[in-house]
């Protein structure tokens, strides 16, 4: 029997996924280490159980979810391209569920316009975090329509196994048309708001990292080009795709917006 | 300390072999596929850092000679400087080959568009005349005075190299700052030494003039 694959993931299962070794040994997780090759080891003993996610703000039914509650939501596999703002990329087979499914459970109010996310942060478990140079806990945000988009995923694992610590255990966000840093790891809090939330990299360098941070080969980072990327496993660079190749699905979200201004 | 000719040859050979250790290590790791998930980035960074290390080592010779009187060190400075050039060449080749796919137009565009590449390339280009004029013959042809003046470029390219390193990291500025700190001490020493030389030391209490 063929596995049940939804049409969205099927449409993008055209590229060869990176190996599990590659995906789990090249990670940006500044709480553990700023050295991408060192994160796997540094996060080895990260305790992610018990785990709760507090979902609140402008919602009808605020609720704190246990990880088990979230694992009960029907899962699917999504093979997505993953493009880092630094100019490298991978293809990753995630499993998870649409963020919309989770948001539907708490019933967002009409006044909600944005979704703010917060990562777990514990100085004891993350002793290297003080050298990261970034303000912690890590925070990220999406516009509500971006959050509700069918491609926006809450991932709980990859390659059929629970989320490895270094990839953002136990649950993380995956927004495949945005630079990787938008896909916040190890989420503990989700808050619906009516104002644009602060985001970690934007706070640090607002001229370099915008709120939207959509993959855009035509808008360069001030210090490097975004026109090409280095796919992990390849030795030369390939052209980057508008919205990381998901333009057909997501371009409509940004109709009438100047993407050079709203980078 | 005196070194006769035979000892000097052996010592130079030892310095040479040691300076090749970073290359041997990375070649061995590459051979065993131990360069990590992104070997391209690793090699580019590694060779760049090694080039900077050798630039700083070269700049350490003079302070050590002056402070500790280790005059013999001067005999190894040229070789160390040439190793800085050697690793900078490997850094450039890795960047040109892997990152730019040997495309001249894309490299030029990169040099113009990305300030940290501009600075890095400028620093490399400053190393070139220093390497070319490193032979005894070139020293004689240029004359010691002009040669020394030209080789002052090393201060500029060292600063350029460290700034280039600082500009590529996102927020983890620790190692670029370590390099900057060491460079500051090395250049600071020279400023201090020059000032000491220029201000004549009063041997006795200056006499009061009526």
Image (cartoon, grey):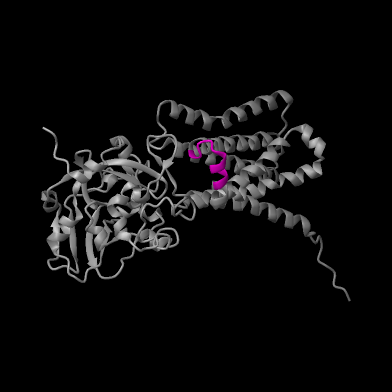
Q: Is residue B202 visible?
A: yes
The extreme right residue here reads: B210
Indicate yes or no whether the magenta region holds residue A170: no
Indicate yes or no whether the magenta region holds residue B101: yes
Query: Does residue A116 appear to the left or right of B184 in the view shown?
Result: left
Q: Which quadrant of the structure image shows residue B81? A: top right
Q: Quadrant of the C terminus of chain B?
A: bottom right
Q: Can you give x and y, in whole percent of width and height, for residue A84 in the image? A: 37, 48
Q: Can you give x and y, in whole percent of width and height, for residue A206 in the image? A: 42, 62
Q: Nearer the viewer, residue A4 or A256?
A: A256
| Region in magenta | B99-109
For the stretch drawn in magenta, the main secondary structure is: helix
Q: Nearer the viewer, residue B174 or A178?
A: A178
Numbered label tally: 0
Residue at figure coordinates x 39%, y 52% from the top left: A216
Query: Does residue B196 appear to the left or right of B26 in the view shown?
Result: right
Q: Quadrant of the N terminus of chain B?
A: top right
Query: Does residue A91 appear to the left or right of B86 in the view shown?
Result: left
Q: Can you give x and y, in whole percent of width and height, for residue B119 in the image? A: 59, 49
Q: Can you give x and y, in whole percent of width and height, for residue A150 in the image? A: 21, 53
């Amino acid at each position: 029997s063929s596995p049940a694959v939804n049409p969205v993931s099927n449409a993008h299962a055209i590229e060869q996924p990176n190996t599990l070794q590659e995906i789990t040994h090249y990670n940006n997780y500044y709480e553990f280490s700023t050295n991408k090759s060192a994160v796997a080891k540094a996060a080895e003993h990260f305790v992610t159980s018990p785990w709760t996610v507090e979902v609140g703000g402008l919602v009808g039914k605020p609720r704190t979810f246990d990880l088990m509650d979230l694992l009960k939501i029907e899962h699917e596999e999504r093979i997505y391209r993953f493009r880092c703002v630094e100019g490298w990329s991978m293809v990753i087979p995630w499993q998870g569920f649409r963020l919309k499914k989770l948001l539907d459970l708490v019933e967002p109010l009409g006044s909600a316009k944005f979704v703010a996310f917060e990562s777990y942060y514990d100085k004891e478990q993350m002793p290297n975090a003080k050298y990261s140079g970034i303000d912690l806990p890590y925070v990220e945000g999406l516009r509500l329509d971006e959050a509700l988009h069918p491609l926006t995923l809450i991932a709980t694992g990859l390659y059929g196994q629970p989320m490895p610590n270094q990839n953002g255990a136990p649950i993380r966000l995956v927004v495949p048309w945005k630079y990787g840093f938008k896909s916040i790891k190890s989420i503990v809090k989700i808050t619906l708001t009516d104002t644009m939330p602060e985001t970690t990299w934007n706070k640090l360098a607002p001229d370099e990292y915008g709120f939207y941070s959509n993959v855009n080969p035509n808008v360069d980072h001030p210090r490097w080009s975004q026109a090409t990327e280095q796919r992990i496993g390849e030795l030369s660079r390939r052209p980057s795709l508008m919205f990381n190749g998901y333009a057909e699905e997501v371009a409509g979200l940004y109709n009438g917006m100047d993407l050079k201004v709203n980078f | 300390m005196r070194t006769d000719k035979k000892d000097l040859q052996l010592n130079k050979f030892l310095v040479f072999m040691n300076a090749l250790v970073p290359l041997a290590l990375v070649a061995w790791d590459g051979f065993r596929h131990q360069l990590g998930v992104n070997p391209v980035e690793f090699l580019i960074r590694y060779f760049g850092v090694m080039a900077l290390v050798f630039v700083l080592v070269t700049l350490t010779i003079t302070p050590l000679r002056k402070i500790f009187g280790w005059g013999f060190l001067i005999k190894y400075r040229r070789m160390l400087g040439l190793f800085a050039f050697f690793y900078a060449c490997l850094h450039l080749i890795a960047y040109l080959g892997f990152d730019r796919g040997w495309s001249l137009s894309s490299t030029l565009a990169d040099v113009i568009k990305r300030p940290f590449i501009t600075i890095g390339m400028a620093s490399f280009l400053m190393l070139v005349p220093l390497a070319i004029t490193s032979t005894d013959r070139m020293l004689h042809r240029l004359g010691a005075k002009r040669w020394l003046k030209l080789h002052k470029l090393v201060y500029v390219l060292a600063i350029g190299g460290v700034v280039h390193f600082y500009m590529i990291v996102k927020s983890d500025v620790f190692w670029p700052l370590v390099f900057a700190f060491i460079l500051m001490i090395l250049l600071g020493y020279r400023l201090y030494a020059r000032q000491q030389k220029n201000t004549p030391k009063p041997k006795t209490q200056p006499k009061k003039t009526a």
